[in-house]
Every structure is written in C-alpha cells, then in structure tokens.
Amino acid sequence: MTRRPATGSLLGLALGDALGFPTEFNDVPAILAKCGPWREMELPGPVAWITDDTQMALAVSRALRAAAGEPAEPGRYAELLRREFIAWNRSPDNNRAPGNTCLTACGLLEDERRDWRDAGQIDSKGCGANMRVTPFGLVPGLTDEERSGAAQLQAALTHGHPTALAAADLTAHATRLLAQGADPTGLVGRLRSYAYDNRETYREKWLGDLWRRAQDPGPEHFIARGWDDCLAALARLEAALRDANPEVDPCLATGAGWIAEEALATGLLCFLLFVSDPVTALRRAACTSGDSDSIAALTGAFAGAHLGADAWPEPWAARIEHRDVLLAFGAEWDAA
C-alpha cells in the first residue's frame, strides 16, 4: 500500500486540532484533571470538531485547487486566497475561537479597493499563518521558489510580521521534506540550513513592497529579522531534543506556541519525540500549557506527512469533522 503523505498530513492536522480543541487555554494540571493521563487521551466524539486552524487550512486548499493547472502567479494566488479568507470570515461556522489578527485582517480584505498588503497586520507574528500553510508543502507542481513565495504571501494576507512569513515558509518546507521521505533525524539540520540560505532573500515578486509597512531600512533587513527568530527557535528545539524528557510539558522547552516560531518549534518537538508513535505525539501536543490545538495540528501534519494515511487509527479518522473533504484533497494530491 502506498504511503499517501498528503492524506496522512491533512488527517493528522485535523486530528491534532480536534484533540487539542478542548485543552486550549488550560494548563497541564487542568488538562490532566479533565482528561486523565495524557498518554490515554481520547479524541472527543461522536464528532471530533475542528477549530479555525483546520478551517483555514481547508480555505488554503480550496484556493490551491482553484489555481491548479495555472502558472503560479502571485496576483492570482492573492486573489484566490483573499476570496477564501473572506468566505471563512463570513461563515457561520467561524465560531471556533478564531484569532483576532485573522478576524481583523479578513475584515479589511473585504474592501476591494484596499491593497492586500495593507490588510495584513504588520506587527503580528501570531501562529495563525503557520496553521494553515501545510497544504503548500503537499500540493504538487510548485517549484521551491514558488512554494516559498506563496507560503509567505498567504501568511502576509493576515500576519505581516517577517517572523510570520519565515515561519510559514519553514513550516511548508518541513512538510514538503517529510512528504518526500526525508529522514526525521536530520530534519532540524536541514531546516536550519534552509533558514540560513534564505535569510536575506526577500520574495519581492510575491510580497511586493510589504516591507515598507515596517520600520526596516530595507527588504533584506526586514526578512532577516524573521529568519533570525526562526533560527533561535530551532536552536531551542535542538537543545530540547538533546535533553528530551517526554513527561515534561514541551512548551517549557520551545515555547507556548501562540507566536509563529514557537508553534513550529513545539509542534516539531512533539513529532520528533515520538516519530514512530504518531498518536502519542498528538496526545503529548494536546496536553501542553500553550496553544494546544495549534501545536497538535502541526504535530499531526508533520507526523502524517512522514508516515502517511495509515498513521491514524480508523476509529479516530472516521469521526473527524469534514473527513470527506480532507480525504478528497489528500487523494487528489497523492495521486499527482
């Protein structure tokens, strides 16, 4: 049987999101009191409800489907993403504790006269832009430059801080590497090299003059700030893996995940602590003192990209909200 990394990653994203939904905003003692031992946490049911993290990942997936077969043109991507983000913002299902940055930016995107660069919140590096970016690591047909630029563009529509851009790019790249079969033991080193290689690369074709909204002296200085934050987070991740204790809250080592680089690092930490045991990785990610649904969503996306669709127990996968939509996108991208 084929591995089907896209299907595995999308299911993992949604399962982690749903497992962490009831534990978000709780500290670890409160989670243990509510859910029991963390290694025995069960997916809520009978329907495992997702949050805005998966909702927006599906919005990105729909934009990518609409762009399929066309040249990867920044203006077209911005138009499609803008349309999907506005539709998400208007949806009556947008009641799953969405982030204020996304709500504010999507409201501003409603004004068609407004340049999308003026809607994105230039000072926000919240994790919302990483949570939805993993489809860019799964969709076929993009070059490395296109994947990088598009990942940063989709972040900038709501979160304009350079760290949000760099972390989204790095998250998509990590997902792509794992989907292509990269060895997880070398993953952090490869991500660090990618960050160094791109540290002063400003994707002007994709971002235009976004950097001018900040106070930086030039575009290279602007984007380097973001990559430096990500490199610092990767250094904390490497230190945590050298002295790993899976019984300790991962947020204490790599951050609570409310901001972009910490969500990436803590999601990777939970995945790398349990590379061959993805359900335990999700449980560890959901039992954290930080942004548990977002951390677990990233953990699931990484684990599923690595292990494929069969990583997830069928009784869990069968109960996830929007299962059929997730499977359809996964099958489409795996087949390609």
Image (cartoon, rainbow, N blue to C red):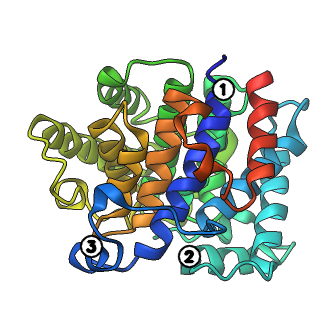
Q: Image check: 118 left or right of 179?
A: right
Q: Residue at x 89, y 45 (%)?
A: 66
Q: CA distance from mark 1 to mark 3?
A: 34 Å
Q: Earlier in the sequence, mark 1 or mark 3?
A: 1
User: Could you say which quadrant of the image residue 107 lies in?
Assistant: bottom right
Q: Nearer the viewer, residue 71 or 315?
A: 315
Residue situated in front as seen by the camera: 274 or 161: 274
Report the residue marked by disc 3. Answer: 32
Q: Earlier in the sequence, mark 2 or mark 3?
A: 3
Q: Amino acid at mark 1?
A: Arg
Q: Could you tell me which residue is drawn at 41 percent across and 27 percent down?
A: 194
Counting from the top left corner in percent of width and height, residue 70 is at: 90, 32
Residue 211 in view here: no
Circle 1 residues within 10 Å: few <14, some 14–19, many ≥20: many
In the rendered structure, find residue 101 and report the number of the disc placed on it: 2
Nearest the eye: 59 or 5: 5
At numbered mark 3, what does the secondary structure look like: helix, strand or loop? helix
Q: Nearer the viewer, mark 2 or mark 3?
A: 3
**Looking at numbered disc 2 in the image, what kind of residue is underneath it?**
Thr
Question: Does residue 68 lie above or below 294 as drawn?
Answer: above
Residue 250 picture location, percent across and down: 23, 55
- Cβ–Cβ under 8 Å for marks 2 and 3: no
Left or right: residue 13 versus residue 74 is: left
Q: CA distance from mark 2 to mark 1?
A: 33 Å
Does residue 38 appear to the left or right of 9 in the view shown?
left
Circle 2: element type: helix
Disc 1 marks which residue? 4
Q: Which three-letter amino acid code belongs to the residue tagged 3?
A: Leu
Looking at the figure, which quarter contains the N terminus? top right
Q: Secondary structure at mark 1?
A: loop
